Amino acid sequence: MQVLENERFRVEISEMGAELTSFKSKTTGTEYVWQADPVAWKRHAPILFPIVGRLKDKTYTADGKAYEITQHGFGRDLEWQANRESDTCVSFTLMPNDYTKKMYPWDFKCTVRYTLNGASLKKEHITENRSDSAMYYEVGGHDAYNLCWQDGEQVTDYYVAFEGTDKLCRIVTDEAVMLTEERMDVPLDNGRLPITRELFANDAVMAEGLPVRRASIGCTKSSRRVTMDFADFDYFAVWSPYKDFDVPFVCLEPWSTLPDGSYLDHAIENKEGVRVLQPGQSETLSFTTTIQE
């Protein structure tokens, strides 16, 4: 476990999956990251790499060859190599091995760097193509933040706020949670998407075309906020597991790419928003989470 710390916050990141496991306020003692209670969900904030979401038939093709890969990719389930850069910065690197090659044929270097600055935590995803052919990849966040920060609050007191719009353009999924070409408008209440159990009855609320790439978890009974800025990511999802009780967390999920669609073929290059790097190229996609107390 790697620890980042300043006078205001303490952050913990596991080398397994390079996963954020704690973002805790020293002022209030509040833990903002979901603590992976398996009754609701066994993860904290997994990194989605090298794919986002499910694949149709659990399969994609590259250069005509079929590959099977686990949902959201293998990045969240492997140990990453940590490199301590300072008291407030640490990076984690994942390289290919025999296990990844069976699912993903390219030679890559993926580095995720966390930097704590005041009340903000920046997460950079740096992906490099070390192959001799074009490499297709996807990356995303799946960060779960606790609700009910203070006594007397309920899940239904919370919302996710968006700026510059009075509705979300929600991507409709089918019974297998595969994307369709259909879109529907989800009205917002003064820019707010209220958190309810039924909101997630059809899985995540996946949105595109946001005029401002920023989302904030807020509460009607408090001025606290958890705000995520994700200018580098074209797509965004809000998710919580659909249970028979109110789940006390919500995930903020910036995605480079959409999950697979029922109307698409299996070719990875045809997925909506998939990234491509030429040999020797690299790119960095970042998002920042800020806590306001």
Image (cartoon, rainbow, N blue to C red):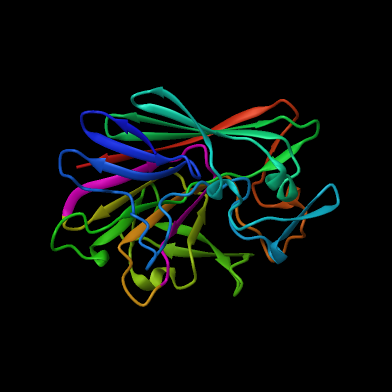
As drawn, is 131 to the left or to the right of 189?
right
Q: What stretch is highlighted in magenta?
A: 222-242
Out of 24 and 56, give the one closest to the viewer: 24
Q: Please, is residue 178 above or below residue 19 in the view? A: below
Q: Please, is residue 285 above or below residue 55 in the view? A: above
233 in the magenta segment = yes
- Helix, strand or loop: magenta stretch: strand
As drawn, is 56 to the left or to the right of 233?
right
As drawn, is 53 to the left or to the right of 44?
right
Residue drawn at x 16%, y 56% is 150
- Which image quarter is the N terminus in? top left
Q: Where is residue 7 in the image (x, y as percent from the top left)?
A: 21, 29
Out of 65 and 213, give the one closest to the viewer: 65
Q: Position of residue 128 (x, y in %)?
A: 65, 30
Residue drawn at x 67%, y 60% is 55
Farthest-out residue, bottom: 244
Q: Where is residue 92 in the image (x, y as percent from the top left)?
A: 50, 33
Out of 199 and 38, give the one closest to the viewer: 38
28 in the magenta segment = no
- Which image quarter is the C terminus in? top left
Q: Where is residue 280 in the image (x, y as percent from the top left)?
A: 72, 25
Residue drawn at x 59%, y 75% is 175
